[in-house]
Amino acid sequence: MKNFDIGIIGGGILGTTISYWISNLYDSSVCVIDKESDVAKHTSGRNTGVVHTPFYLDPEKKKIFAKSAYLSRNLWKTLAIQTQSPWMEIGTIEVAIDELQHKTLEKYQKWGIENGVNEDSLLILDSNGLKQKEKNLECYSGLLCKDDVSTDYSKLTQEIKNISRQNSTEFIFQKTVKSFQQKNDSVQINFTDNSSIECKYIINCSGGNSLDIAKQFDLFESYSDLHFRGEYWIADSNYADIVKTNIYSVARHPEFPFLDPHWIKRANGTTEIGPNAVPVPTPETYDGFVTDIQTTISKLGDILTGGAKKLFLNPDFLSLITHEFRSSISKDAMVQRVMNFIPSLEPNYFTKKGTAGIRTPVISPEGNFIPDVLEREGQNSFHIVNYNSPGATGAPAYSALVVKKLQDKGFLKNPKSQKNSLWDFNSIIEQI
Ligand SMILES: Cc1cc2nc3c(=O)[nH]c(=O)nc-3n(C[C@H](O)[C@H](O)[C@H](O)COP(=O)(O)OP(=O)(O)OC[C@H]3O[C@@H](n4cnc5c(N)ncnc54)[C@H](O)[C@@H]3O)c2cc1C
């Protein structure tokens, strides 16, 4: 059986960046395990591809996501330039359709500055000011954030994998983690093909499966999760440039910001609208399942336990899920929502579906969605759950923070000096 000092479960953007830091700072044997044939095959390669400026994140409730996103933008930029990966400084306009939503934009501007964003990067413009920039945009006002970028997180994760490999990280693909055997000073990881490896310490960043894996260590026992598929529609090329900036709209239900689709300029040159939020039974149900939302909801209600069950008994949530989520499933309804701010669109401009991704929000025992990332330490293990949007943006800084925590607890041995490093660990840690 092969032995490693550190075993990272999950070759998404999080597991891969953590492997980069450990292999860069320590003389330890590190492996990243993934059931797929390469990194970033799930959420990290199936997202909107935006490097988010954290103006819309509450600095108290989403502190880690906000700080990590703020610090990571320039880290990604360095990598993108070095590796000739896509980096399109497109900018985002967050639009308000009435006076009430305008107040939210003012709050976002304040939050952005509290989260470290430069004042000059966050401009509130009235409807006329916006028309000069985007003549097909109709709204009451908008917050223009010049710093937002479109990139390809799959490519960026690949590049980090390559550097991590040069630092001797071993990537073990096509192995599905099934179970664990706790030993005194190590953990045996058992795979579905009946093979095993042994690691002195494991880090669980398995995305939509993280909570289930953490539960195998008797952690987060009364927490639960839900999976929502986010679908996109691609604009026909004749209409792709009627608006040249990313457009987001103020969330009508702030606790479910993913119910309001955006107008997205992708790094590959296409324009898409989306995502919506379709409840699905697993973190990998990319197609099918939902034809009748009522049956879907009752099926989910049957399999849910703990906080998620409570959430499904909450009449407000149920009404939202039946009305809002029902309409989010239809293409026409999605286009209709985007037409609230780009009225010249028509559903027949969108004939092809984009690549769907699945988010897995974690729900507290009381039945509430958890706002920030959650961590727990087990015996010889560390578990990260609820690593949702803007997790791709924040991965370089957040993974440095995780490594710092493990360092402070004495779980990482044999430090080495950081030479020829892509990113500077100490300067990130000083700022976080
Ligand atoms: C629709 C959508 C749009 C988004 N848009 C953005 C955006 O524009 N900008 C942004 O910053 N963030 C965005 N996000 C969030 C971002 O994509 C995620 O926060 C991030 O990708 C999570 O990375 P991860 O490494 O934790 O998870 P993942 O990428 O899901 O990686 C987990 C890995 O674990 C592996 N795994 C799971 N179980 C096992 C097992 N048992 N054995 C072996 N391997 C296993 C999986 O194969 C997978 O590769 C979006 C998310 C969604 C869903």
Image (cartoon, rainbow, N blue to C red):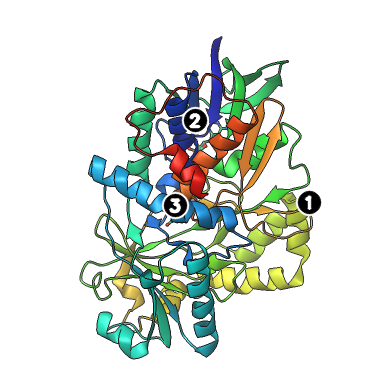
Instruction: Give the amino acid type for the residue marked by disc 1 in the picture.
Output: Gly
Q: Quadrant of residue 37?
A: top left
Res. 71 mark: 3
Picture coordinates of residue 413, whole percent (x, y): 56, 20
Instruction: Give the amino acid type for the residue marked by disc 3 in the picture.
Output: Leu
Q: Is residue 109 left or right of residue 362?
A: left
- Residue denoted by label 1: 306
Instruction: Give the amino acid type for the residue marked by disc 2 in the picture.
Output: Lys
- Residue denoted by label 2: 35
Res. 274 mark: none
Viewer-side residue, 358 vs 74: 74
Q: Are marks 2 and 3 in contact (CB under 8 Å)?
A: no
Picture coordinates of residue 278, whole percent (x, y): 55, 60
Q: Which-is-in-front pick, marks 2 and 3?
A: 3
Is residue 286 among what the camera can see? no
Q: How far is the residue under mark 2 from the one under mark 3?
A: 30 Å
Picture coordinates of residue 208, whole percent (x, y): 57, 44
